[in-house]
Image (tube, rainbow, N blue to C red):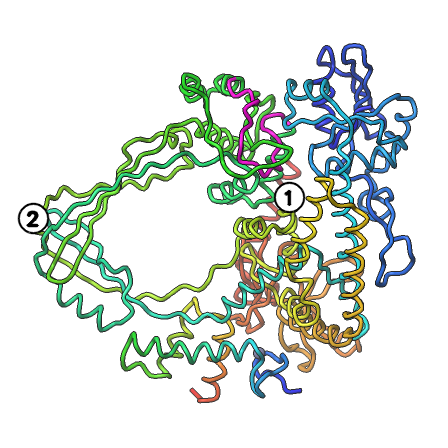
């Protein structure tokens, strides 16, 4: 039995290993498996869908501390995972009739653990006797080689995976319960407030940045803009100081320079040689995809993952910036040479010595991300195509010659003042020719001037500007910071970045901290700052590495984690009331900002807020006095998109305004929109659109 | 326990919470840079201009609103 990680990997692996490349696909309900023949071995290829087993607490009660757990089928912990039940059942049933097991999951910590847990709990097999296929791409050649050279399981890697899951489980479950119960004890509400081992420090980074932004006071500065006239030709000149901190200075410079003749003093040239950028690892790919396409890191990872499953690129969850000498570079380039877009470049490179530039970062299991040279067998979506093109071009650029740039600067003198004119010339394109659209040259021609020439300063102006505050994180910059701080792994970082948003701790694409995020951050930093510190996670990553090297034992690490967790929880318990109060205050501020819409116009002493009907699940605006039967004022709301109350009121009807964000569309309206006299035209247009859509639906 | 008159958090100086206090201190200290940059700028002109700049931090704006509301229009 060959155990794979995903359905598409199973299909690919079965095809690669089968003698005739045509394995038999067998359907069992909604689940599929493959039978194939490799020489004389009869193989059954099955798949998991990521983790099939999850940790569950063994003691009773939704409380803390809870330290003991066991592995159970994931659907017992997470009801949404019920689709994996038939998969486990099938593996269980088929495993009774096989005489050996080969793990062919992704070669990394999670993949190794998935294989091990499936083997142990679904197949009930002895892991010591099982085999492991190791590969970095899903090409036929790599898979066949991995099959021939298969060895035993990588137990240190599996142990490290166990430790990460257990520690994450311990911290996630206990800290989340502690926070949630603190609120419940103070206010009686049940609102789950989650935190975790990596999420805490991530929230802390965002909150620190938010503080700096909120405290920022801009300061003024001035810039000088000069247009010169040289033999009737206009040219832009730079004042030698980029910024001036006083208005008086700026005015004086303008007065002194305007209308004067300046002299070209010297013209300097500086040649810069720039080697190609190193090969992609996951984080540099994610950063570049964000820069050029605006893709979130999690999206880039998902796309890269699917390109990997199509055998178009190597395994993307890698830290490496190196290409091993064993890699068949010639084969890859020959493959790329068969594709219309890359044929010319690949053929040019194949004439050279095929030595790529290498980066510094390494990975124990995988090389840097590179194309496999296989042709896409199906149509790639536009986003897939973009990421694939970026990866191919980066790979091709590794073989290019250095780029040579010429920086030029003419110094122009007027009295005691100095002005510059700059030029930038690309002397040799080198690798940038292969990197193509992902390289921005910024070429600028230096005007045709000589030493001693006179330039008349025809126009001189000063401009008042203000300093900019610190920038908010975007998904790529936050991911980079996590990597720099060694928080999380290349596999988990992008989901952590997403989770702070999905939990309501931040809002908007730019990670603006919400009041809820602030409340959680404030509470944690006041009462249990350790949870926000990256220190614990960093320590754990070091210990996991030691386990992988065989110099530390899983039991010791877990014991240590439990001891320190118990200490933190005891401290938490002693301050539970204060913690609860701080969180409740923060939540109230959060709800006020996100749900309250001011006083009720009907009863005057109630507050309008956004509520959800328990019956239909639809949201609407209701009055807080509804509960006592005192007021039945309601307003309908759009059901799609995120709503946020605004401070302003409607110019037509004076009801409060709201912003609706749905996908990329953002619009504003008042809560009285269905009756507002100023919005009847909009309403009619909406009705027209709807009835048109309906007739379209019916018609076609 | 006294509350911050702007946001209701616990106050640290009888008037503002730690964040609004920090914003207040920042606002006062940056005034000197503005005076050096633009001789003759008054405190009132300064806070009015800072209030109108998009880059100004939220807590700073709230402090300015608080100051302006005390001084009257
Ligand atoms: Zn405050």
Res. A694 mark: 1
| Label 1 element class | helix
Magenta region includes residue A326: yes
Instruction: Examine the rendered structure and indicate whether residue A195 appears above or below residue A356.
Output: below
Quadrant of ligand 1: it is: bottom right
Callout 2: residue from which chain? A
Q: Is residue A144 left or right of residue A335?
A: right
Circle 1 residues within 10 Å: few <14, some 14–19, many ≥20: few
Res. A452 mark: 2
Instruction: Examine the rendered structure and indicate whether residue A346 appears above or below residue A398.
Output: above
- The magenta-colored residue range is A310-330
> Which residue lies at the image location 65% right of the left edge and 29% below the top edge?
A309
Magenta region includes residue A288: no
Determine the image quadrant of residue A560.
bottom right
> Which residue lies at the image location 56% right of the left edge and 63% below the top edge?
A669
| Label whose residue precedes the other's in the sequence (1 or 2) | 2
Q: Quadrant of the C terminus of chain A?
A: top right
Nearest the viewer among A628 and A161 is A161
């Amino acid at each position: 039995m060959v155990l794979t990680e995903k359905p598409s990997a199973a299909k690919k692996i079965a095809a690669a290993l089968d003698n005739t490349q045509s394995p038999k696909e067998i359907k069992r309900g909604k689940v599929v498996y493959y039978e194939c023949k490799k020489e004389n071995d009869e193989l059954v290829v099955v798949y998991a869908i990521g983790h099939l087993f999850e940790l569950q607490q063994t003691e009773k009660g939704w409380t803390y501390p809870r330290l003991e757990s066991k592995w159970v089928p994931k659907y017992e912990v997470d009801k949404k995972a019920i689709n994996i039940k038939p998969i486990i059942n099938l593996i269980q049933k088929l495993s009774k009739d096989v005489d050996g097991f080969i793990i062919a999951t992704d070669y990394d910590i999670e993949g190794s653990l998935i294989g091990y847990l499936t083997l142990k709990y679904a197949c009930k097999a002895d892991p010591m006797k099982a085999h492991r296929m190791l590969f970095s791409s899903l090409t036929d050649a790599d898979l066949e080689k991995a099959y021939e050279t298969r060895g035993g399981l990588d137990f240190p890697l599996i142990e490290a995976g166990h430790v990460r899951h257990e520690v994450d489980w311990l911290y996630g479950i206990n800290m989340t319960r502690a926070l949630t119960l603190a609120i419940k004890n103070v206010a009686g509400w049940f609102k789950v407030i989650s935190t975790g081992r990596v999420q805490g420090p991530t929230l802390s980074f965002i909150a620190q940045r938010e503080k700096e932004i909120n405290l920022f006071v801009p300061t003024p500065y001035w810039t000088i803009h000069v247009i010169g006239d040289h033999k009737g030709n206009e040219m832009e000149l730079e004042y030698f100081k980029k910024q001036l901190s006083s208005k008086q200075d700026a005015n004086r410079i303008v007065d002194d320079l305007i209308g004067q003749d300046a002299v070209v003093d010297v013209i300097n040239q500086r040649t810069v040689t720039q080697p190609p950028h190193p090969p992609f690892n996951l984080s540099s790919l994610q950063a570049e995809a964000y820069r050029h396409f605006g893709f979130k890191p999690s999206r880039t990872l998902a796309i890269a993952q699917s390109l990997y499953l199509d055998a178009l690129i190597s395994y993307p969850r890698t830290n490496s910036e190196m290409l091993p000498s064993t890699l068949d570079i010639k084969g890859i380039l020959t493959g790329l040479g068969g594709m219309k877009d890359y044929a010319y470049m690949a053929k040019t490179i194949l004439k050279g010595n095929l030595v790529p530039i290498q980066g510094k970062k390494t990975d124990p299991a995988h090389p840097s991300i590179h194309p496999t040279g296989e042709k896409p067998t199906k149509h790639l979506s536009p986003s897939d195509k973009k990421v694939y093109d970026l990866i191919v071009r980066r790979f091709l650029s590794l073989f290019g010659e250095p780029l040579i740039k010429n920086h030029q600067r003419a110094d122009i003198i007027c009295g005691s003042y100095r002005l510059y004119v700059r030029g930038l010339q690309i002397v040799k394109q080198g690798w940038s020719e292969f990197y193509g659209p992902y390289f921005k040259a910024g070429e600028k021609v230096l005007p045709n001037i000589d030493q001693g020439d006179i330039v008349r300063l025809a126009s001189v102006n000063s401009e008042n500007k203000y300093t900019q505050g610190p920038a908010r994180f975007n998904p790529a910059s936050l991911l980079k910071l996590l990597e720099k701080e060694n928080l999380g792994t290349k596999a988990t970082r992008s989901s952590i970045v997403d989770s702070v948003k999905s939990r309501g701790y931040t809002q908007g694409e730019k990670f603006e901290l919400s009041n809820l995020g602030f409340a959680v951050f404030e509470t944690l930093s006041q009462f249990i700052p350790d949870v926000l510190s990256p220190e614990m996670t960093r320590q754990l990553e070091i210990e996991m590495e030691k386990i992988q090297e065989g110099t530390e034992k899983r039991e010791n690490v877990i014991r240590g984690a439990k001891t320190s967790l118990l200490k933190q929880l005891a401290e938490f318990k002693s301050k539970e009331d204060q913690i609860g109060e701080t969180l409740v205050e923060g939540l109230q501020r959060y709800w006020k900002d996100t749900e309250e819409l001011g006083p009720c116009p009907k009863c005057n002493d109630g507050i309008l807020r956004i509520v959800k009907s328990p019956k239909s699940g639809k949201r609407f605006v209701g009055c807080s006095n509804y509960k006592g039967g005192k007021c039945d004022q309601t307003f309908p709301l759009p059901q799609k998109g995120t709503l946020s109350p605004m401070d302003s009121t409607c110019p037509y009807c004076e009801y409060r305004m709201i912003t609706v964000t749905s996908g990329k569309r953002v619009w504003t309206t008042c809560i009285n929109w269905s009756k507002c006299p100023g919005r009847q035209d909009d309403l009619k247009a909406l009705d027209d659109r709807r009835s048109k859509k309906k007739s379209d639906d019916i018609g076609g | 326990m006294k509350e911050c008159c702007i946001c209701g958090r616990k106050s640290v100086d009888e008037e503002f919470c730690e964040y609004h206090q920090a914003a207040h201190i920042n606002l006062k200290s940056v005034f000197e840079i503005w005076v050096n940059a633009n001789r003759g700028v008054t405190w009132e002109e300064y806070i009015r201009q800072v209030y109108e700049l998009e880059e100004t931090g939220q807590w700073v704006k709230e402090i300015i609103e608080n100051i302006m509301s005390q001084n009257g229009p």
